[in-house]
């Protein structure tokens, strides 16, 4: 069984993001970039499936600039077998376009399982995995915190976190899982594997070669700092609070 | 508590711009390693240092190894981290590929090693001692011993130690009394007491391979009578499995000022008739063989100074950004909108002092490591020779100056915290306590200074008999750079300070060379300040070079805060440290006699 893991290069989780001065987006110049943390869980899960003998090959794929190759190599260092870069240059690629690109890749690769991170920490869209599943017409289990895959019966059992607790789903393969942080604890890469990672097979394609139009359908008007928190005040009693909520905040 | 973040940006800058990583990677022996891979290694090591080793540091400080009846146990967190460290291949990183290592350049190892030392000196000591022992075995032992011991030492399954010191033999190894008597089967019965043995006993590795200096029965007195023996804790069967326990025991652990997380052991060999040992190389060459690992160890201890300084700086900075205490002078807004203590002028002085000095120490250490690679791997004999000469000259600086500086820098870290810095829970005090040993072990600062003034300067000669050739060559190179910089439109002030300090160093060097033979005591009385002067000048030179590059990048329109910071630290360093050059020169040249003036009975 082949597992496909889409990963995204994002601003490192420890970097404090700032909007660009012209408010057209987030400042990315000279900012440390890393693999999206949820995608690390996705890669880890795929690698564990391979170690258990359930998966035969783990293929990581990223849509992004040439620099995203580093992110793919970091996934190769923790056990992925092969990497595909869909080089989109500096173009903005939105979730729908990414899902279409991944569909094109999946049509070629024919994975039985695609494991996404539940969301990317840069735009927090939480869409790509779901759109991809819909495009494929596959079952999906988002926000997985427990997974069990049985190839022989062609089923995956997935525990996912919902508001009230844990929901357990059974999916027929091929299927889509999106990984939550609690799914597993990603490993540290071993030094010899870091050194060998670049030598693993890597291929590059482009949106044009895959025949996908990535023109954004949504337009970002402005990215700005959240308003600074204004100082609070103390109220004397409940009556004053209710009055303020009614007359000043106008929320009741 | 703060979290360690490897200063990857400064590390990369120093590796690439100051230490010549590109040239090192271009050496034929490193054809397998490219810049991207080095980058990936640094990233992974940084993660491991931050998440696995750094959290151990205060734990090991409070709960160090525990001794009972000769058995030493560490806290479970230490054991887990050691296992992970080995499994992830970090332990074998510096080892020869033939024995399971990665064959990476020293220059890459040094950056990674700095991270381990920042995260925890005490923990990092165990792999450091093992890699030193590996180096001695690899260079001098028979193929048989190498094949039997190196692979398992390389991956950390077995650890290693170096046993030099005895109660009566500290800096003076000629006083060593431990004995080795031939047992008639090619092995030796080793007996004696060794003290201050770092990680001499513990339960993280399956076996411990001790390298022990001892005398053969017919050995002459002095250093030439000392041989090196390999003495394993458990004897090793021919199939590599562990056999009987050898006749050696850890009879106590020391109670120390710092590095509480490491097991500093008293080792008793041969209480029951003799520990079985194997001679390494030739008899009588033990001290020379030990120095194979000693030079490595000195660079690595110097790196402890760099690492602990960086860590103390990060800790102090985090506190200074958080702690609010009083309005800032000259800033009225800070009365109504309080600002953290980072804005107080003297806290800023402390922090920039810590930062700029740490950067200077790092630059000198990495610069030396770059030359270590060229000295060992350059295909050009002239380059090898020149680089080796630089390594020899700079090693006492890296060891002596970095560690002495680290004591001051970690102390400044406490000062930033004020009263809470004196309280152990704050964590700032540990860095000072841990730093204190670095200026003592593997050769005290005086030993480094004696080496620097004597063997490396006044007694060093090239083939033509020119005394102090290497020192003079390097200082001339620095002076030429300073001359040019003094004409730079933007950095002339740094250039002038560097020029003056370098001239002071050159003056002292000429004076030292002149008086060394007739008045060696006077030369040695000033050797520690001379070492300091050397460190300040070489460090100031490399920071000035950094500033020049940073200025070029800024002029080219790179709006990188890092470059602005580098300019600021280089300026600070010139105006606060390079300016001390003249005073130090006066102290050394004119002050030596005053040290010796107080006669012994008058003390």
Image (cartoon, coloured by chain):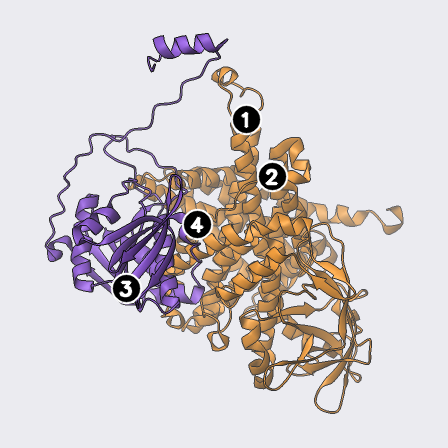
Chain colours: A purple, B orange
Would you name the residue on which mark 2 appears?
Answer: B413
Q: Which mark is residue A154?
A: 3
Task: For marks 1 and 4, give the CA distance.
Answer: 28 Å
Q: Where does residue B33 sit, x and y in percent of width and height? A: 37, 66
Q: At 63% from the left edge and 44% from the top edge, which residue is drawn?
A: B584
Query: Considering the numbered disc 3 on the image, is that residue within a helix, a strand or a loop?
Result: loop
Q: Where does residue B60 sit, x and y in percent of width and height? A: 65, 52
**Which of the two discs, 1 and 3, sits closer to the camera?**
3
Mark 2: few, some, or many residues within 10 Å (few <14, many ≥20)? many
Letter of the chain that mark 1 sits on in the rendering: B
Q: Are marks 3 and 2 in contact (CB under 8 Å)?
A: no
Q: At 65% from the left edge and 39% from the top edge, which residue is drawn?
A: B425
A218 vs A243, nearest the viewer: A243
Q: Where does residue B199 sit, x and y in percent of width and height? A: 67, 63
**Which of the two discs, 3 and 4, sits closer to the camera?**
3
Kindly indicate whether the residues beneath marks 2 and 4 are on one polypeptide chain.
yes
Horizontal relation, residue B271 to residue A98: left or right: right
The answer to whether A141 is drawn above or below residue A242 in the figure is below
Would you name the residue on which mark 4 appears?
Answer: B8
A160 vs B157, nearest the viewer: A160
Q: At 57% from the left edge and 46% from the top edge, which residue is drawn?
A: B309
Task: For marks 1 and 2, give the CA distance.
Answer: 15 Å
Would you name the residue on which mark 1 appears?
Answer: B344
Kindly indicate whether the residues beneath marks 3 and 4 are on one polypeptide chain.
no
């Amino acid at each position: 069984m082949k597992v496909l893991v889409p990963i995204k290069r994002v601003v490192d989780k420890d970097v404090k993001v700032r909007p660009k001065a012209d408010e057209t987006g987030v400042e990315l110049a000279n900012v440390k970039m890393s693999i999206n943390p949820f995608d690390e869980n996705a890669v880890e899960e795929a690698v564990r499936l391979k170690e258990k003998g359930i998966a035969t090959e783990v293929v990581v794929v990223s849509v992004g600039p040439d620099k995203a190759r580093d992110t793919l190599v970091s996934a190769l260092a923790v056990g992925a077998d092969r990497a595909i870069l869909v080089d989109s240059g500096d173009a903005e690629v939105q979730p729908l376009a990414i899902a279409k690109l991944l569909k094109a890749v999946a049509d070629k690769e024919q994975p039985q399982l695609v494991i996404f991170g539940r969301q990317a920490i840069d735009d927090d869209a939480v869409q790509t995995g779901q759109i991809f599943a819909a495009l494929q017409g596959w079952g999906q289990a988002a926000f997985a915190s427990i997974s069990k895959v049985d190839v022989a019966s062609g089923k995956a059992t997935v525990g996912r976190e919902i508001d009230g607790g844990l929901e357990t789903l059974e999916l027929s393969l091929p299927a889509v899982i999106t990984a939550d942080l609690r799914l597993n604890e990603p490993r540290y890469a071993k030094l010899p594997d870091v050194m060998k990672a670049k030598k693993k097979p890597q291929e590059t394609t482009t949106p044009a070669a895959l025949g996908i139009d990535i023109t954004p359908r949504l337009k970002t008007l402005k990215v700005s700092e959240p308003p600074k928190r204004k100082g609070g005040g103390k109220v004397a009693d409940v009556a004053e609070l209710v009055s303020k909520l009614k007359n000043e905040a106008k929320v009741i | 508590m703060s979290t360690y973040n490897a200063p990857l940006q400064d590390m990369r800058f120093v590796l690439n711009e100051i230490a010549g990583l590109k040239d090192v990677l271009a050496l034929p022996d490193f054809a397998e390693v490219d810049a991207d891979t080095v980058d990936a290694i640094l990233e992974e090591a940084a993660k491991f240092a931050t998440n696995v080793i750094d959290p151990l540091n205060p734990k090991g400080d409070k709960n160090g190894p525990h001794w009972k009846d000769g058995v030493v146990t560490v806290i479970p967190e230490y054991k887990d981290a050691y296992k992970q460290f080995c499994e992830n291949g970090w332990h074998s990183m510096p080892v020869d590929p033939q024995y399971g290592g990665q064959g990476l350049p020293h220059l890459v190892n040094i950056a990674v090693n700095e991270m381990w030392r920042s995260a925890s000196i005490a923990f990092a000591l165990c792999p450091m001692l093992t890699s030193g022992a590996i180096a001695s075995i690899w260079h001098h032992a028979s193929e048989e011993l190498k094949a039997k011991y190196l692979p398992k030492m390389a991956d950390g399954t077995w650890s290693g130690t170096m046993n030099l010191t005895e109660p009566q033999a500290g800096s003076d190894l000629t006083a060593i009394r431990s004995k080795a008597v031939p047992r008639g089967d090619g092995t030796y019965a080793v007996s004696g007491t060794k003290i201050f043995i770092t990680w001499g006993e513990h339960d993280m590795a399956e076996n411990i391979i001790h390298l022990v200096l001892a005398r053969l029965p017919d050995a002459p007195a002095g250093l030439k009578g000392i041989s090196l023996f390999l003495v394993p804790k458990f004897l090793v069967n021919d199939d590599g499995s562990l056999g009987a326990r050898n006749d050696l025991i850890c009879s106590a652990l020391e109670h120390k000022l710092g590095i509480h997380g490491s097991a500093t052991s008293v080792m008793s060999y041969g209480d029951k008739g003799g520990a079985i040992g194997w001679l390494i190389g030739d008899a009588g060459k033990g001290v020379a063989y030990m120095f194979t690992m000693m030079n490595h160890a000195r660079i690595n201890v110097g790196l402890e100074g760099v690492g602990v300084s960086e860590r103390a700086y990060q800790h102090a900075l985090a506190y200074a950004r958080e702690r609010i205490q009083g309005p800032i002078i000259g800033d009225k807004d800070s009365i109504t909108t309080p600002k953290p203590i980072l804005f107080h002028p003297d806290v800023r002085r402390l922090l920039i002092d810590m930062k700029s000095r740490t950067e200077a120490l790092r630059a000198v250490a990495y610069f030396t490591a770059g030359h270590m690679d060229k000295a060992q791997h350059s295909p050009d004999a002239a380059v090898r020779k020149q680089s080796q000469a630089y390594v020899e000259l700079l090693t006492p600086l890296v060891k002596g100056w970095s560690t002495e500086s680290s004591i001051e820098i970690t102390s400044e870290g406490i000062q930033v915290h004020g009263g809470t810095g004196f309280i152990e829970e704050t964590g700032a005090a540990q860095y000072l306590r841990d730093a204190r040993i670095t200026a003592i072990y593997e050769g005290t600062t005086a030993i480094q200074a004696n080496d620097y003034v004597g063997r490396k300067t006044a007694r060093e000669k090239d083939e033509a008999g020119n005394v102090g050739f290497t020192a003079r060559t390097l200082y001339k190179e620095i002076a030429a750079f300073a001359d040019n910089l003094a004409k730079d439109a933007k950095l002339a002030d740094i250039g002038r300070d560097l020029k003056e300090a370098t001239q002071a160093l050159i003056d002292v060097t000429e004076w030292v060379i002149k008086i060394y033979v007739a008045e060696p005591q006077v030369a040695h009385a000033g050797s520690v300040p001379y070492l300091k002067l050397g460190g300040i000048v070489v460090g100031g030179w490399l920071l000035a070079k950094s500033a020049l590059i940073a200025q070029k990048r800024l002029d080219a329109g790179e709006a990188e805060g890092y470059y602005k910071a580098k300019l600021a630290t280089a300026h600070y360093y010139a105006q606060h440290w390079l300016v001390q050059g003249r005073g130090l020169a006066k102290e050394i040249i004119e002050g030596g006699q005053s040290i010796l003036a107080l006669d012994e009975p008058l003390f």
